[in-house]
Amino acid sequence: MMITRRAFTAALSLTGLAALAGFSPLRLIADAMAQSASDVAKPVSLPDMALGPANASVTITEYGSMTCPHCAKFNETVFPRIKSEYIDTGKVRYVFREFPRDVKDAAASMLARGIARDDAGKYFAVIDILFKQQNQFLEKSTETLTRIGKQAGLSPQAVKDCIKDQALLDKLAADRKFAIEVLKVDGTPTFFINGQMLKGARSFEAFDKRIKSLLKS
């Protein structure tokens, strides 16, 4: 990328104006990052489903979709290692937020919320089942949700009630809108590690390196 003399001069001028006003470009960037972290930290419409201590020095927030194959692969291969090495040892708090991509996605999220209520452990167990049975769910959505609901003690009617809860659907939609407009989430999975965005499914090593650097700081 070529920087013209005019663009360079303009940048210097802006830097000078910022300094005169008592700010610096680095501080402006830091303030923006702090604002982003603050935006990520607060749940909007639905309470967060999280594992790990609330006061952990590192918080990972995942925006995932029950119908996303990359999310399912991450859940199978990477998340278990993060859980055993960092969540279960109290070093990381892990938050999962739904980012429904379609009606099936929303229905799965609503069932998970309906089964778990406020029990985060139960919620993560349900989404683990949904990810592991993703292919069946995509092919036979109603039957799969009914079967998972039955395993959790829900009648077929109770499952229907879960996935027809308009108030819950409205909250999912509001949270998705916030993620898109404020956090700039545009696909799944998207992660925020202490507020810093990390797009796409990554290896355990990528998370491990980032987490260790934050734990040292």
Image: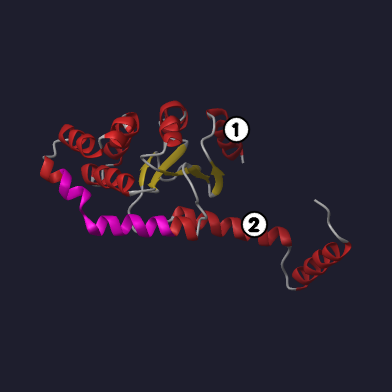
- When asked about the image quadrant of residue 148, the answer is top left
Q: Do the residues labelled 1 and 2 touch (CB within 8 Å)?
A: no
Q: Does the magenta stretch include residue 175?
A: yes
The answer to whether one can see residue 44 in this image is no
**Which residue extends farthest front?**
139
Percent x, y of residue 42: 43, 56
Q: Is residue 14 above or below residue 121?
A: below
- When asked about the image quadrant of residue 216, the answer is top right
Element on which disc 1 rests? helix
Percent x, y of residue 127: 32, 37
Q: Name the residue under label 1.
A: 209
Q: Which residue is drawn at 51% across and 36% down?
A: 201
Percent x, y of residue 17: 78, 72
Q: Residue at x 24, y 44 (%)?
A: 111
Element on which disc 2 rests? helix
* In the displayed structure image, the side of residue 200 where residue 66 appears, left or right: left
